[in-house]
Image (spheres, rainbow, N blue to C red):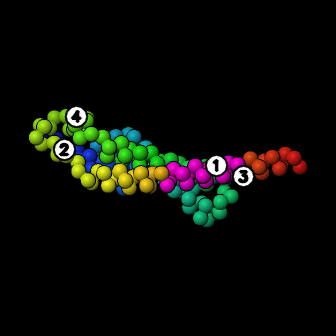
Amino acid sequence: MPSLKSKTLATWAAVVGGPFGLHRFYLHGLNDWLGWLLPVPTLLGAWGLRRVAELGQDDRLAWVLMPLLGFTVAATMLQAIVFGLMPDERWHARYNPDAPPDAQPASGWGAVLGVIVALLVGATVLMSTIAFSGQRYFEYQVEEALKMSQ
């Protein structure tokens, strides 16, 4: 019998290592192609953060790259919330279909705490990403309008 997949562990894997695909590898194994794709936008976004630290906020490439990190983090936090709030019966039917009913443990407070952390982190990162992207977009629009009027 394969080992049981823990809802709590999957929730926390998405919270802690979601942008690098840790939760995907836990649930689907190392052959999961989506798990291998997740680090790409994460690392590109981290490169954008580094560019802002080195070159300042006016770097246009950083403006394009940073939202990749923000949206990837927000998406993996959403996945953690989905995992943590999924009913135990549905979780076991999807990820532990071969386990006997008496071997299927309840998730408990660990998953709930993971959902709370994911909600806090995900909402903060998503709002920050939208605010930064919107600000830079409208600043560039004003700059272009001023160039056109001169």
Distance between the alpha carbons at the discs numbered 3 and 4? 50 Å
- Element on which disc 4 rests: helix
In this view of the protein, can residue 16 be seen by the observer? yes
Distance between the alpha carbons at the discs numbered 4 and 1? 42 Å
Question: Residue at label 3?
Answer: 139
Residue 97 lies in the magenta-colored region: no
Residue 105: which numbered mark, if any? none
**Magenta region:** 124-139
- Element on which disc 2 rests: loop
Task: Name the quadrant of the N terminus.
Answer: top left
Distance between the alpha carbons at the discs numbered 2 and 4? 11 Å
Query: Dot 2, how many residues are within 10 Å of its Cα: few (below 14), some (14-19), or many (20+)?
Result: some
Query: Dot 4, how many residues are within 10 Å of its Cα: few (below 14), some (14-19), or many (20+)?
Result: few
Report the residue at 23% width, 50% height from top: 108
**Residue 134 drawn at (x, y percent):** 64, 49
**Residue 23 drawn at (x, y percent):** 33, 47
> In terms of sequence position, does the residue under pointer 3 or pointer 1 come before the other?
1
Question: Residue at label 2?
Answer: 4
- Element on which disc 1 rests: helix
Question: Residue at label 4?
Answer: 93
Residue 131 lies in the magenta-colored region: yes
